[in-house]
Amino acid sequence: MKQVIQKLSIPDTNIESLQERRFWLQCERAYTWQPIYHVHGRLMAVELLTVVTHPDNPDLRIAPDRYFAEVAVRHRVDVIKEQLQALEQKASFFQKNDLLASVNVDGPTLLALRQHPEILAFMERHPWLRFELVEHIRLPKEASLASLCEFGPLWLDDFGTGMANFSALSEVRYDYIKVARELFIMLRQTTEGRNLFNMLLHLMNRYCRGVIVEGIETQEEWQDVQRSPACAAQGYFLSRPAPLDTLEDAILSL
């Protein structure tokens, strides 16, 4: 299967070492997708995932969060543009099947996108696109909630880890919230934990349109999610990530 490989073309980053700077600039990106299914089995959305490699060792994948942490925000903005363009080529698929597509973005990059009206216009042309915050951000004093909502409904990733915690529920009205696998696995170990998990999701549902559970790897985990107040799930049990050019082969209903 053919994948389009992209390279960063901007020669300047904030990395101190010239050798490290050269390394990160030489990294290559390809894109895959992973489906998100409603608990009743219908395909709800697709998350765009980034595969990062270096030409010196193309079989070794570099963690995307490490890669994005090493490049400047202006470079991350360029990657976002690249991702949106890749999804735009599949626009008819999303429109025909009434599906959503999510693109991961960190807080500083999302705030920087406000300086790029062409991206705002892009999101307005494609209302099936969603930005998925990989961390909850506390807004600067000069920033308003409206300044983030201009990009359309926002999703929150990895609730229960790092900064994505209870404070996020009251500060920003998210469209959907994703619960990290770590929290799900920790709470499902005991009857008391499962009850607490269900209570947590009931609470979260008051602050968003629905909760998506991440990292489902077994049939038992999928059944637990189906019995919970969650609206959807994703994970290896449902589907592993696949190259973007196979998107039209997605299973629309389990």
Image (cartoon, rainbow, N blue to C red):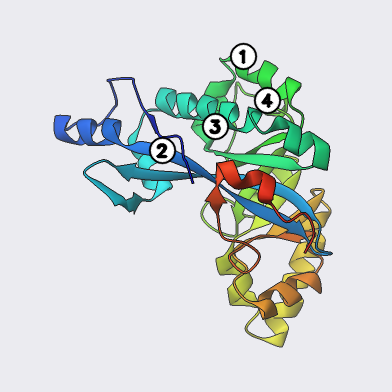
Say which residue appears at 74% left-offset and 37% top-offset.
93
Q: In what element is the residue under mark 3? A: helix
Q: Which residue is mark 4?
A: 144
Which quadrant would residue 160 be assigned to in this image?
A: bottom right
Residue 123 in the figure: left or right of residue 108:
right
Please report the residue visible at 55 percent of the width from the left and 55 percent of the height from the top: 241
- Is residue 25 visible in the rendered structure shown here? yes
Tell me where residue 240 appears, x and y as whole percent: 56, 60
Q: Position of residue 54 (x, y in %)?
A: 28, 42
C-alpha separation, residue under disc 2 versus residue under disc 4: 33 Å
Give yes or no for contact between labels 4 and 3 (Cβ–Cβ under 8 Å).
no
Q: Please give the name of the residue rendered at 45% of the width and 35% of the height, measured from the top-left corner.
A: 4
Residue ID for mark 1 = 118
Q: Position of residue 57 (x, y in %)?
A: 24, 48
From the viewer's side, name the closer residue of 165 and 190: 190
Q: Of label 3 and label 1, which has the lower sequence position?
A: 3
Going by the picture, which residue comes out furthest to the front? Answer: 1
Image side of residue 173 versus residue 90, left or right: right
Residue 29, which numbered label? 2
Q: Secondary structure at mark 4?
A: loop
Kind of residue at badge 3: Gln
Q: Do the numbered discs 2 and 3 sit on residues whose CB atoms are within 8 Å?
A: no
- Total count of labels: 4
Circle 1 sits in a helix, a strand or a loop, which is it? helix
Q: Earlier in the sequence, mark 1 or mark 2?
A: 2
Q: CA distance from mark 1 to mark 4?
A: 20 Å
